[in-house]
Image: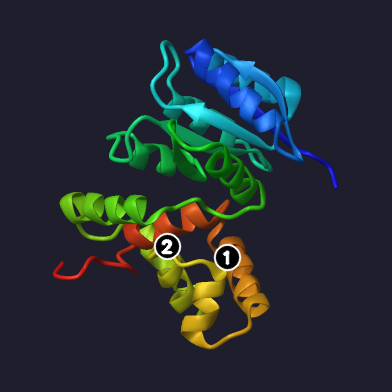
Amino acid sequence: MNAIRVLIADDQMMVRQGFTVLLDAEPGIEVVGQAVDGEDAVAKVAELDPDVVLMDIRMPGLGGIDATRRITAPAGATVKVLVLTTFDLDEYVYEALRAGASGFLLKDASAAELAHAVRVVAGGDALLSPNITKRLIAEFSRTAGAPRAPLKERVGALTERETEVLSLIAQGLSNAEIAARLVLAEQTVKTHVSRILVKLGLRDRTQAAVFAYETGLVRPAGY
């Protein structure tokens, strides 16, 4: 099995070097490069073709959010972006997820947490902790208006079961947890998730979660 190729984008050299040392010590993970800002990250992705980019949000010049958008926007792009932030309530985390990031990670994460995060997003899953799920809910509670019609119409392409699975994805449940909740085989849930992403034209579970909130499919209690 090929090693997961990682690019680290951060304007602080100590952060880049520290994460490089931690990840290179992990089996099945290889740091293939470092980027000093967003522009550098976009260029290095094109040059090095990493599987995962650890992306700092706040960098001079082109920031992490815009860099994430440019990296994930091209049709057929497969690289996953894992956002690095200092605080789990960073005001930009939500925008980074909308820009195409597959999850977020605190900069003070342990080596084990860092390696786990890289493996999760490289495998195509979202890294949505309970805290970030709550933040998504809070953000939509604050800004929610009427669901945008084009998005709402796209939900109609889903079957009743797929709609149910999508709502559980948005609540932060894993495939195993969804399987237990709906009394289904985990492989069946994986099939539903794949069909949801294809039908809605979404990259991954993170985009699916954001989509569910934007369409009003999932609403916080009391709203």
| Nearest the eye: 1 or 64 | 1
Residue drawn at point x = 22 percent, y = 60 percent: 146
Would you name the residue on which mark 2 appears?
172
Residue drawn at point x = 57 percent, y = 61 percent: 197
As helix, strand or loop, the secondary structure at mark 2 comes to loop
Horizontal and vertical percent position of residue 193: 58, 68
Q: Amino acid at mark 1?
A: Lys
Horizontal and vertical percent position of residue 109: 47, 37
Residue 84: tell me if it is visible.
Answer: yes
Q: CA distance from mark 2 to mark 1?
A: 20 Å
Q: How would you rate the neighbour count of disc 1 (Cα within 10 Å): few for under 14, some for 14-19, many for 20 or more?
A: some
Q: Nearer the viewer, mark 2 or mark 1?
A: 2
Would you name the residue on which mark 1 appears?
199
Q: How would you rate the neighbour count of disc 2 (Cα within 10 Å): few for under 14, some for 14-19, many for 20 or more?
A: many
Residue drawn at point x = 63 percent, y = 53 percent: 124
Q: Quadrant of residue 45?
A: top right
Q: Quadrant of the C terminus?
A: bottom left
- The residue sitting at the right extreme is 1
In the rendered view, tell whether residue 2 sits above or below residue 17: below
Horizontal and vertical percent position of residue 155: 44, 69
- The residue sitting at the bottom extreme is 183
Residue drawn at point x = 43 percent, y = 32 percent: 108
